[in-house]
């Protein structure tokens, strides 16, 4: 089975639910989660485009970090020290009760934060998927390390076998060389013996011919 292509080393970790930035994966706007189903998340961007996006959890988490803006997730108004109640898309800013009382955003497009704030079940679902993917990544890394160790061990065994085979071949070559040298030595000694016997025979024959010629000469001059 083909292993999933995971990249969770940089996956965000959070101490509390408030730390999670549920911004759009294509911009820094807030989102309204429509559905979370296994490894798929579908949401509506609350920015000016109001586009709907459906993609894998892992892809969403990685893309979301490009536009992560913690400021849009702070739930307390820094000006009035009051908890935010709405988000104004015309001004691209959060509004607390005191901000709303100014009526400066009366005709602006707004949404109540409580309507889009992820509930505990959604947060736990995403956390569960992140932990599941991290465990898968850990298992894949462990499997990789196990295979590397197995291959290293196998490589050492192969190196030992190759060295043993090399020694056997080298010994065989040396034996063949010794055999060839012995045969050559035997041939040389036989050839020396043959030549010696041949020379001795020729010397003996030449000596015999020399004596015969000598006697013949003596006989001729004796008659004279």
Image (cartoon, rainbow, N blue to C red):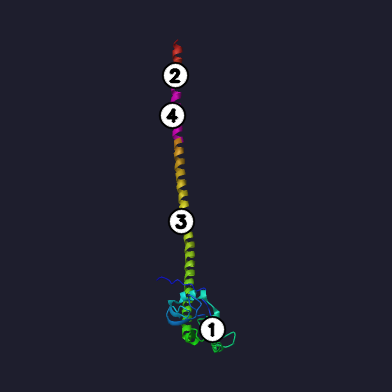
> Disc 2 marks which residue?
213
Q: Position of residue 196 (x, y in %)?
A: 46, 32
The answer for how far apart the CA atoms under marks 2 and 1 are is 143 Å
Q: Is residue 8 magenta?
A: no
Of labels 1 and 3, earlier in sequence is 1
The nearer-to-camera label among 4 and 1 is 1
The answer for how far apart the CA atoms under marks 4 and 2 are is 18 Å
Question: Are there few (<14), some (14-19), or many (20+) residues within 10 Å of tag 2?
Answer: few
Of labels 2 and 3, earlier in sequence is 3
Does the image show residue 117? Answer: no
The nearer-to-camera label among 1 and 3 is 1
| Dominant SS in magenta | helix
Of labels 2 and 1, earlier in sequence is 1
Q: Is residue 213 above or below residue 125?
A: above
> Disc 4 marks which residue?
201
> Disc 1 marks which residue?
94
> Disc 3 marks which residue?
165
Q: Is residue 109 above or below residue 143?
A: below
Of labels 4 and 2, earlier in sequence is 4
Q: Residue furthest top?
A: 224
- In which quadrant will I find the N terminus? bottom left
The residue sitting at 45% across, 41% down in the picture is 184
Q: Secondary structure at mark 4?
A: helix
Question: Are there few (<14), some (14-19), or many (20+) residues within 10 Å of tag 3?
Answer: few
Give the residues in magenta. Answer: 192-213
Q: Is residue 200 magenta?
A: yes
Q: Is residue 186 above or below residue 58?
A: above
Of labels 4 and 1, earlier in sequence is 1
The residue sitting at 51% across, 75% down in the picture is 67
Q: Position of residue 95 (x, y in %)?
A: 54, 85
The nearer-to-camera label among 2 and 1 is 1
């Amino acid at each position: 089975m083909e292993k999933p292509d995971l990249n969770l080393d940089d996956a965000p970790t959070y101490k509390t639910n408030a730390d999670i930035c549920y911004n759009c994966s294509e911009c820094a706007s807030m989102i309204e989660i429509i559905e979370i189903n296994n490894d798929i998340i579908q949401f509506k961007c609350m920015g000016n485009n109001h586009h709907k996006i459906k993609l894998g959890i892992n892809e969403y988490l990685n893309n979301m970090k490009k536009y992560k803006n913690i400021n849009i997730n702070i739930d307390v108004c820094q000006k009035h020290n009051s908890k935010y109640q709405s988000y104004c898309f015309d001004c691209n800013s959060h509004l607390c009760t005191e901000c709303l009382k100014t009526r400066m955003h009366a005709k602006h497009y707004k949404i109540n934060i409580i309507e889009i704030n992820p509930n505990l079940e959604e947060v736990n679902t995403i956390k569960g998927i992140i932990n599941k993917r991290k465990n898968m990544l850990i298992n894949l890394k462990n499997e990789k390390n196990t295979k590397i160790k197995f291959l290293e061990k196998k490589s050492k065994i192969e190196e030992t076998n190759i060295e043993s085979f090399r020694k056997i071949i080298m010994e065989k070559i040396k034996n063949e060389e010794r055999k060839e040298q012995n045969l050559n030595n035997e041939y040389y000694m036989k050839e020396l013996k043959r030549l010696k016997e041949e020379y001795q025979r020729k010397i003996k024959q030449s000596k015999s011919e020399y004596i015969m010629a000598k006697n013949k000469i003596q006989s001729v001059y004796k008659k004279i």
